[in-house]
Amino acid sequence: MIQNLLYVLILLAGFPIGWFLAKICKEEINNWRGRLFGIVVICFMLVIGVSFTNFLYKIPIIMSLFLTVIICLKIIWMSYR
C-alpha cells in the first residue's frame, strides 16, 4: 500500500519537475520539441514491451518510464505558451 502511494507521489512530482525544466531552458526547448516527442513515443513503446515481460522490477521500470513521459509532455506543453 505504501509502495503504491510512493509511486503515485513520484508520478505527481513529474509535473513540477517538467514545469521547472521548461522555465529554466526556454531557448533549448524549441529546438528539442521534436526530440522530446520522440522520447515520449519511445518510452510508451518500452512501457508496452516491458508490460509483457515477467521479471522482478517490472513495475518500477514502468513507473520511471511514465515519469519520463510526464516530464517530457509537460515541457512540450509549456513550450507552446
Image (cartoon, rainbow, N blue to C red):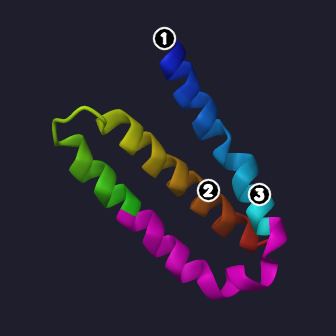
Would residue 76 be found to the left or right of residue 50 on screen? right
Report if residue 54 lies within the magenta region.
Answer: no
Which circle's residue, 3 or 1, is located before the other in the chain? 1
Mark 2 surroundings: few (<14), some (14-19) or many (≥20) residues within 10 A? many
The residue pinned by badge 3 equals 19
Distance CA(mark 3)–CA(mark 1)? 29 Å
Q: CA distance from mark 1 to mark 2?
A: 25 Å
In x, y percent, where is residue 1?
Answer: 48, 11
In the rendered image of this protein, does residue 8 appear above or below residue 63?
above
Residue with the mark numbered 2: 71
- Marks 2 and 3: in contact by CB < 8 Å? no
Which residue is painted at 45% across and 40% down in the image?
Answer: 63
Reply above or below: 37 against 15: below
Q: Which residue range is magenta in the image? A: 23-42
Q: Quadrant of the rendered structure where residue 72 is?
A: bottom right
Amino acid type shown at disc 3: Trp
Residue at 40 percent across and 37 percent down: it is 60
Residue 81: image location, x then y, percent? 81, 71
Q: Quadrant of residue 61?
A: top left
Tell me the distance, in whole angstroms, between the alpha carbons under discs 3 and 2: 8 Å
* First in residue order: circle 3 vs circle 2: 3
Q: Is label 3 or label 1 in front?
A: 1
**Magenta: main secondary structure:** helix
Amino acid type of the residue that numbered disc 1 sits on in the rendered structure = Met
List the single residue furthest toward the front. 56
